[in-house]
Image (spheres, rainbow, N blue to C red):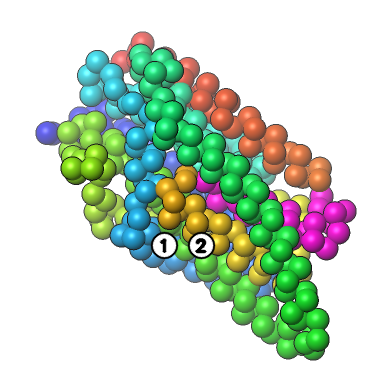
Amino acid sequence: MGLSVALIVSVALVLGVIFVNGWTDAPNAIATVVSTRCMSPRAAVIMAIILNTIGAGFMTLVSSEVADTMTKMVRFEGDTSNQALIVLAASMFAIVVWATAAWYFGIPTSESHALIAGITGGAIALGNGFDAIVPGEWSKVLIGLGASSILGFSSGFLFSKLLVVIFRPVKRAIADRFFTRGQIFGAGCMAFMHGAQDGQKFMGVFMLALFLNGAASKNSEGAFDIKWWLIILCSVVMGLGTSAGGYRIIKAVGMDMVKLERHQGFAADLAAASVLLFCSLTGLPVSTTHTKTTAIMGVGSARRITSVNWGIVKEMVTAWVLTFPGCALLSYLMAKLCLIIF
């Protein structure tokens, strides 16, 4: 089938959302390694771009469960495929608006949550109402939200405590050298898992846009076969977004919320990457921002509860709570408006 204007606009906006994700969400993966000065921002960004690409490609080959969940959690069906594409484009635009506003205020809101909320709001607006939501698949979002919060905080707390015990007899200079390298390794793991989680989410939405135009098909299991060109395209666009900025988010997560030492940054990265790996393999679409931030909270609390700037935490939690209803409503309204106009 030929390319429609609605498809071109939808794909452009999906790529725009991927760029914004790299701009506002990917910096979380390298926040700790930059804030502890183990790597320069430039070197960290280059590492993030490379490992984002590898992570997205590798995890898609191993398990594309997250991408499948994203395309199955709502019924994106309209009277015509053109209507569905118009609504998808409106949803993507709503996500860009929401994420950019959060970046402007330096709040590390979750683009993953915004993406899920935006698609859900659009599907409801398409005419299916709440019947558009597939409870079994959407429940994975809620399970992932709880799992990433609990596991992120607890693993950050435990990893930090464990490292203190293990390295207590080790000379400070030796420990510092180890944790400098460890931080780089941990940040690399986080960048890899960011590509594995977020890359799959956006590739799933990209494939949905192609499918609605008849330019892609599903296999016998009802899932999309994601091509390498799409993996590379999404990773490059996300990398360009990461290189465009993100220092405000790095400052909020890696500096303002908790003053991290190198062993704590290593613990936070390792904890968050482990949780993201578990969730990716089980098909739970979780937020890398959410997971990394709760891991940092756990690390800070392991030192003492007052080490965490709970005022910053309150702002973040408020943003997380508001993202689902706020972005879903914005997407719903934009979708309805676009259906009236077009």
User: Secondary structure under badge 1?
Assistant: helix
Instruction: Give the residue displayed 69% in from the left and 53% down from the top.
Output: 153
Specify whether residue 307 is in view.
yes
Q: List x then y, in percent, for residue 133.
A: 41, 25
Under mark 2, the amino acid is Ala
Instruction: Give the residue displayed 70% in from the left and 34% down from the top.
Output: 318
Q: Nearer the viewer, residue 69 or 124?
A: 69
The region drawn magenta spans 286-309
Confirm whether the magenta stretch covers residue 267.
no
Q: Which residue is mark 1?
A: 55
Most extreme residue toward the front, as rendered? Answer: 136
Instruction: Give the residue displayed 77% in from the left and 87% down from the top.
Output: 170
Secondary structure mostly seen in the magenta stretch: helix
Q: Distance of mark 2 from mark 1, alpha carbons? A: 8 Å
User: Is 197 left or right of 43, judged from the image as shown?
Assistant: left
Instruction: Give the residue displayed 39% in from the left and 39% down from the top.
Output: 70
Q: Which residue is mark 2?
A: 191
